[in-house]
Image (spheres, helix red, strand yellow):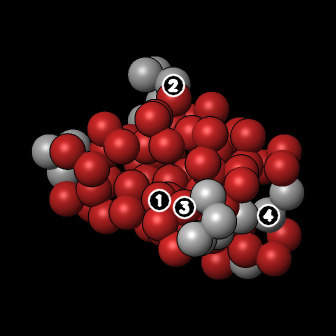
C-alpha cells in the first residue's frame, strides 16, 4: 500500500504535503522497509522544497553508494532540490 501511495504522489507532486514527505523520510530511514517502497519514497522526496530536504541530506547520501543503480538514481532525484537551490 505504501509503495502505491508513493508512486501515485510521485506522478502528482502537486498533492505532496509535509505529512506525506515525513512518511517518505520515515520509509527511507527504516531498515525494515522494503527497497521497493524506498525507491518511490526517494522519488517523492525529490519533489519537495529544498528547505524540507536539506535537514535529511545525511540519510540520503548513503543511497548514492548503494549496490543497486536504481536506488542510486532515486537518491539523486531526492537530492536534486538541495543541489539546485542556491539558497540552501
Q: Residue furthest front?
A: 87
Q: Which residue is mark 4?
A: 16
Measuring from the top left, give residue 67's x and y in whole percent: 14, 45
Q: CA distance from mark 3 to mark 1?
A: 6 Å
Question: Going from the N terminus, do you reach mark 4 or mark 2 first?
Answer: 4
Q: Judge left or right: residue 42 versus residue 16.
A: left
Q: Which residue is mark 2?
A: 30
Residues marked 3 and 1 touching at CB (< 8 Å): yes
**Helix, strand or loop at disc 3?**
helix
Question: Going from the N terminus, do you reach mark 4 or mark 1 first?
Answer: 4
Q: CA distance from mark 3 to mark 2?
A: 22 Å
Q: Judge left or right: residue 45 versus residue 64.
A: right
Residues marked 4 and 2 touching at CB (< 8 Å): no
> For the point 27% across and 56% down, which residue is it?
72
Question: Going from the N terminus, do you reach mark 3 or mark 2 first?
Answer: 2
Can the viewer see residue 44 in this picture? Answer: no
Amino acid at each position: 500500500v505504501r509503495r502505491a501511495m508513493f508512486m501515485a504522489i510521485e506522478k502528482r507532486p502537486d498533492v505532496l504535503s509535509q505529512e506525506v514527505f515525513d512518511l517518505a523520510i520515515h520509509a527511507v530511514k527504516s531498515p525494515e522497509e522494503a527497497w521497493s517502497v524506498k525507491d518511490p519514497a526517494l522519488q517523492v522526496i525529490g519533489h519537495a522544497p529544498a528547505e524540507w530536504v536539506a535537514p535529511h541530506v545525511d540519510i540520503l547520501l548513503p543511497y548514492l553508494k548503494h549496490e543497486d543503480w536504481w536506488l542510486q538514481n532515486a537518491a539523486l532525484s531526492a537530492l536534486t532540490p538541495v543541489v539546485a537551490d542556491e539558497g540552501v
